[in-house]
Amino acid sequence: MDFFTRCCKKFKLVLLAITLGFAPQVQAEGIEVKSAELVPAENNYQLNADFEINFSAEMEDALNKGVPLSFLVEFQLVRPRDYWFDREITTKTQRIQLSYHALSRQYLMNEGPHQKSFASLEDMMEELSHLQGWSVFAKSDIESGENYVASLRFRLDPSRLPKALQVEALSSEKWTLVSERYRWTPDLSALANSSR
């Protein structure tokens, strides 16, 4: 009988391990910059980027209850220097505000003067995950033959939350939504030559 009991316990453990191994993985909340590139336009360079964005349940719930969420996309271009601080070429910030309009049952995304509406949170999140054609600096800002380092970060701006939520946002990981700073070395001279 003792042998049978031990075998049953081992079988249950193996079954549990198999079940957990095949269970769907829940994505952790957070923001990750998946890719970023600078593309030459007429007189400037534009930024295209893709993000993976996963809200916490608390953030989704707050948004659905009418709390607007404000995000900042932060871009910087510097020229590295060996014996001094890096030379800042440009630092740009773009604010994106998300909200839910209960009467129309639509999700709204505001980027500066532009507003887009969506029938579902999933549609809005898909749009939020792709940044296209953001003019970040003029071609005249850079010098031929120099190396540059670009960086990009996407984060929730807790200072724009209602006061009651700001306190919670400071103490809870569920409201800490910020990407790692994504850095890359764009070949701006090659991009400029290819656009001519």
Image: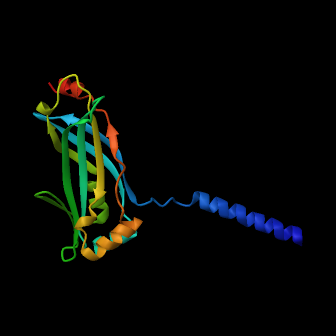
Residue 41 drawn above or below residue 95: above
Residue 74, horizontal then vertical, whole percent: 24, 49
Residue 22, horizontal then vertical, whole percent: 58, 58
Residue 162 visible in the shown view: yes
Residue 155, horizontal then vertical, whole percent: 30, 56
Closer to us: 122 or 135? 135
Residue 129 visible in the shown view: no
- Residue at the location (27% across, 36% down)? 85
Closer to us: 76 or 37? 76
Image quarter for residue 166?
bottom left
Quarter of the figure with the C terminus:
top left
Quarter of the figure with the N terminus:
bottom right
The residue sitting at the front extreme is: 83
User: How many numbered marks have been drawn onto this rendered protein structure?
Assistant: 0
The colour scheme is rainbow
Residue 10 drawn above or below residue 67: above
On screen, residue 56 versus residue 140, left or right, reads right
Residue 91 drawn above or below residue 96: above
- Residue at the location (33% across, 40% down)? 183
Image quarter for residue 43?
top left
On screen, residue 69 versus residue 116, left or right, reads right
- Residue at the location (23% across, 38% down)? 77
Residue 27, horizontal then vertical, whole percent: 45, 59
On screen, residue 128 versus residue 16, left or right, reads left
